[in-house]
Image: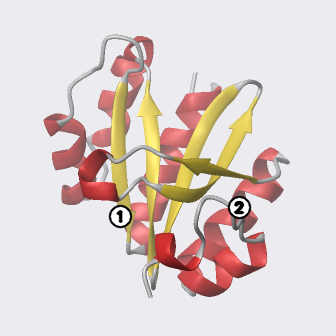
Amino acid sequence: MVWSELYGKGNQPTFEQIQEYVSAPLWDELTDYLQQTYNIKPRIEYSGCIMDKGAWKGWNVKYKKGGKSLCTLYPKQGYFLSLITIAEKDATEADMIVSSCTDYIRAMYHNTEFGKNYGKMMGIEVTSEEILRDMKEFMALRIGAKK
């Protein structure tokens, strides 16, 4: 069943229900990593954004540290999407990181323009350990650990 049909705007899922719906080891690995490495707790929020044919609409899980968003996770059955933003001021460091990333992440990074107010917003399908590793590098840059 489609996520937005299971949990509509008035029916907020628990973190455990989200975890069960995604049912992917990479979800568990990333959420554990974020909580242990950055000592941050997930926030479940509803988004009405219909960007990318509704891929971003519905309940999602946000991780923020020091007022900065590290990532927003969108549940899908068997995997998840992660929205990561790269600020334009971090472009030099991001360019260095992306050179060692997977082909998928390199292509996404190079094909995504910097937005006027928000930087590069990359919607990443997290489907492999390598992609997850690349995400962790961008999150570290986002909070300043790479500087």
Q: Nearer the viewer, residue 4 or 36?
A: 4
The three-letter amino acid code for the residue at tag 2 is Tyr
As drawn, 94 above or below 19? above
Using the image as rendered, state which of residue 55 and residue 63 is in the foreground.
55
The percent coordinates of residue 123 (x first, y second) are 35, 49
Callout 1 crowding tier (Cα within 10 Å): few <14, some 14–19, many ≥20: some
Looking at the rendering, which quadrant does residue 59 occupy?
A: bottom right
Nearer to me, 41 or 96: 41
> Regarding mark 1 in the picture, which secondary structure is present there?
strand
User: Is the residue 62 above or below the residue 22 in the image?
Assistant: above
Residue 79 spot, x, y in % from top left: 44, 77
Relative to 52, 124 lies left or right: right
Residue 145 in sight: no
Q: Are marks 2 and 1 in contact (CB under 8 Å)?
A: no
Q: Position of residue 39 (x, y in %)?
A: 85, 48
Above or below for 85 versus 15: above
Image quadrant holding the C terminus, namely top right
Q: Nearer the viewer, mark 2 or mark 1?
A: 1
* Relative to 23, 102 lies left or right: left
Residue receiving disc 1 = 125
Asked if residue 39 lies left or right of residue 1, the reply is right
Res. 48 in view: yes
Q: What element carries label 2?
A: helix
Q: Name the residue under label 2.
A: 33
Left or right of residue 143: residue 49: left
Per the model, the C-alpha gap separating discs 2 and 1 is: 18 Å
Split into 4 quadrants, where in the image is the N terminus? bottom left
| Three-letter amino acid code of the residue under disc 1 | Glu
At 55% across and 81% down in the image, what residue appears? 22
